[in-house]
Amino acid sequence: MGDTLGFSCKGVPDNKERAEMYKIAVIPGDGTGPEVVNEGLKVLEAAGKKFGFKYETKEFDFSGQRYLKTGKLVDDSDINELKKYSAIYLGAVGDPQVKPGIIETGVLLKLRFALDQYINLRPVKLYSPAFCPLKDKKAEDIDFVVVRENSEGLYKGMGEFKDKGTKDEVAIQISYNTRKGVERCIRYAFEYTRKRDKRKKLTLCGKTNVLTYAWDLWERTFNEVAKEYPDVTTDYAHVDATTMWFVKNPEWFDVIVTDNMFGDIITDLGAMVQGGMGIAAGGNINPDGVSMFEPIGGSAPKYTGKNVINPLAAICAAAMLLDNLGEAKADKAIEDAVIKIVSGKLNSLAAGKMGYSTTEIGDLVVKNL
Ligand code: IPM
Ligand code: MN
């Protein structure tokens, strides 16, 4: 009952056998993307040796830089090629010279949508209280996961202008929610909560008091699916209150499920309470297809090429990727190494202030594996 999706905690099919050779597509991207990806690959190599898995990588140049040179974004033949891979490892895309929206929709959202990565999984875990901006919070107080719907909502790009450029202009942006899309996300969240097996509490984060169409569908679906998971405690919080509680009582949360836009917003706040963008990783997951893992911080152009950016978010994304492939031991070992370094060595998690360079941090993780 309930276990219809058949995947483990982070989107691994339950019966997945270890592949002879994983095929990992690497998209270094723009800005500091290539630098942090290098460190992630360094750690991946060390983990492969230690845990005995084999993989090959192929680099794909999808980036703002490439767009500026060639006008190319991600097209359908690229998508078909990527479908042959076990997973995708992404640094960051976005170049300040390109008008906002082009790379986001033409690369990142194109990949998420075309590969039907309908879950955006964002763990929020405090590795060291020293880097938490909240007063008096212990590491165990901040340990939750946001399950963000990743294929619909306001991100669908539906809408229109009326009388554009006139005084009577109207701009309409539609939040598009399908029963199927909402239900698969909610089911994933229930499965995930059960398999995570911590507090077994799933909070629906929405706005039922104002957005009375979308959140009516979400709430009804949530309550129906909940009946199949009597072992999971359910809760509801409005999105505005959720941001308040992230700061005031983050220990209340175990797993949170929400739509694409709210998930985008609350996970940036989540990243800050866990110590900042330097440590925040996420997965774009298609439980039946190819998933993509990325540090969530962006291309940070001003730090490019300086060897000062924090690669730990990208290293944690690589760990999530390994878990998704079924290499749970490697995932755990990398996370433990990261915890050790974060709590014992670093002055800060912010770029340029860590007390170590980008490459030194990669080396430290390898050493502590
Ligand atoms: C994220 C990013 C993206 C999003 C942008 C770059 C399109 O902010 O991954 O959260 O809004 O999803
Ligand atoms: Mn975001």
Image (cartoon, rainbow, N blue to C red):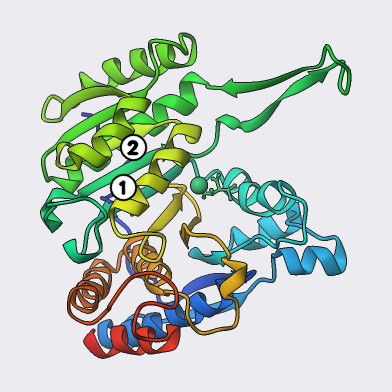
The numbered disc on residue 7 is 1
Spatial CA span between label 1 and label 2: 9 Å
Task: Please tell me which of labels 1 and 2 falls first in the chain.
Answer: 1
User: From the viewer's perspective, is residue 173 above or below residue 56?
Assistant: above
Q: Is residue 13 visible?
A: no
Q: Position of residue 244 (x, y in %)?
A: 28, 33
User: From the viewer's perspective, is residue 74 above or below residue 209?
Assistant: below
For residue 298, what is the image quadrant?
bottom right
Under 8 Å from ligand 1: the CB of mark 2? no
Q: Position of residue 78 (x, y in %)?
A: 71, 60
Q: Is 55 situated left or right of 134 in this image?
A: right
Q: Is 242 situated left or right of 357 in this image?
A: left
User: From the viewer's perspective, is residue 15 above or below residue 1?
Assistant: below
Q: Residue furthest front?
A: 135
Give the residue at mark 2: 188
The numbered disc on residue 136 is none
Q: Position of residue 28 (x, y in %)?
A: 59, 72
Looking at the rendered structure, the secondary structure element under dot 1 is loop
Locate the N terminus and report the quarter of the image it occupies.
top left
- Binning the other alpha carbons within 10 Å of mark 1 as few (below 14), some (14 to 19) or many (20 upward) gives many
Locate the C terminus and report the quarter of the image it occupies.
bottom left
